[in-house]
Image (tube, rainbow, N blue to C red):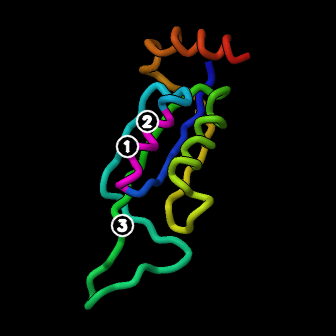
Amino acid sequence: MRFKLLVAFVEYDKSDAVLDAARAAGATGATVINNARGEGLHKKTTFFGLSLEVQRDVILFLVEEHLARHILETIEQVGEFDSTSGQGIAVQIDVEDAVGVAHQVEQLTKVVEDKL
């Protein structure tokens, strides 16, 4: 079975919605890294030298390759990445090999066979 790594940089207040939507779209779990800081096209303004940045989370999803694009598109829609500037980004990366996912392979095999 082949996997993709989806990496989503999401505003803190949308993390739970993105996680729930990704799971509904076929993701079997995620790892959340809190307190990430990002800088987009325009630098955030400051107030008396204090940054007014919104807290972000980095969410990592290891997903089956046939489900990856659908999950990625779902993350984009829920996170509103393309509709509103500065909301976040998500990328998809090929995974050469993975261990520790044997318990998920049975479940994923059934889901992928049903979708194909």
Residue at the image position 55 percent from the left and 55 percent from the top: 80
Q: Is residue 32 above or below residue 13?
A: above
CB under 8 Å between callouts 2 and 3? no
* Other residues around mark 1 within 10 Å, as few (<14) / some (14–19) / many (≥20): few
User: Which residue position is annotated with label 3?
Assistant: 54
Q: Position of residue 81 (x, y in %)?
A: 56, 57
Query: Is the N terminus in the top left, top right, bottom left or bottom right quadrant?
Result: top right
Task: Tell which circle, 1 or 3, labels the residue nearer the N-terminal end.
Answer: 1
Q: Is residue 99 left or right of residue 56?
A: right
**Quadrant of the rendered image containing residue 73:** top right
Q: Is residue 36 above or below residue 30?
A: below
Q: Is residue 82 above or below residue 5?
A: below
CB under 8 Å between callouts 2 and 1? yes
User: Which residue position is annotated with label 2?
Assistant: 20
Q: Is residue 4 above or below residue 76?
A: above
Task: Tell which circle, 2 or 3, labels the residue nearer the N-terminal end.
Answer: 2
**Quadrant of the rendered image containing residue 30:** top left
| Mark sitting on residue 75 | none
* Other residues around mark 3 within 10 Å, as few (<14) / some (14–19) / many (≥20): some
User: Which residue position is annotated with label 1?
Assistant: 16
For badge 2, the amino acid type reads Asp
Q: Is residue 83 left or right of residue 55?
A: right
In this picture, which residue range is highlighted in magenta?
12-22
